[in-house]
Amino acid sequence: MNMYEIDAMKQVLDSMETAVKLRSQAKAERRAEEAERAKRDFQEKLMLAAATKTELDSMASGVKGAQDAVQRDQLVGLMMASSVL
C-alpha cells in the first residue's frame, strides 16, 4: 500500500467519522426539539386544567350560594310561620 492509498483511506475514514458525528448531532437536536415541544404541550395542558378547575370552583361556589339562599329563605319562612302562631 503506498502513501496515496493510505491518505485516501484516511480521508474516507475522516469523512465517515464526520458523517457519524453530524448524524448524532442531528438526532440530539431532534430529541431536544421533541422534548421542548412536549414541555410546551404539558404546560398548555396544565394551564387548561387550571382554567377548568377555576371554572368548576366558580360553578361550585354559585351552586353553594344558591343552596345557602334556599336554606336562608326556608329559615326565614319558618321564623315567620312560628311568629304567626
Image (tube, rainbow, N blue to C red):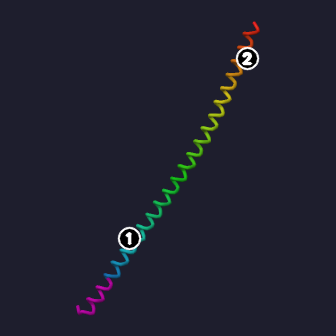
| Mark 2 nearby-residue class (10 Å; few <14, some 14–19, many ≥20) | few
- Left or right of 65, for residue 43: left
Q: Position of residue 41 (x, y in %)?
A: 52, 55
Q: Residue at x 55, y 53 (%)?
A: 44
Q: Which mark is residue 24?
A: 1
Against 61, residue 42 (above or below) is: below
Q: Identify which residue is drawn at 45% across, 66% down.
A: 30
Residue type highlighted by circle 2: Gly
- Which corner quadrant of the image does residue 74 belong to? top right
Farthest residue in the left direction? Answer: 1
Near-viewer residue (74 or 23): 74
Q: Is residue 47 above or below residue 82?
A: below
Q: Position of residue 66 (x, y in %)?
A: 68, 29
Residue 59 part of the magenta-drawn span: no
Residue extending farthest to the top is 85
**Magenta range:** 1-12
Amino acid type, mark 1: Ser
Residue annotated with mark 2:
77
State the image coordinates of residue 37 (x, y, percent, origin top left). Answer: 50, 60
Residue farthest along the right direction in this orientation: 84
**Cα–Cα gap, marks 1 and 2:** 79 Å
- Comparing 51 with 8, the one in front is 51
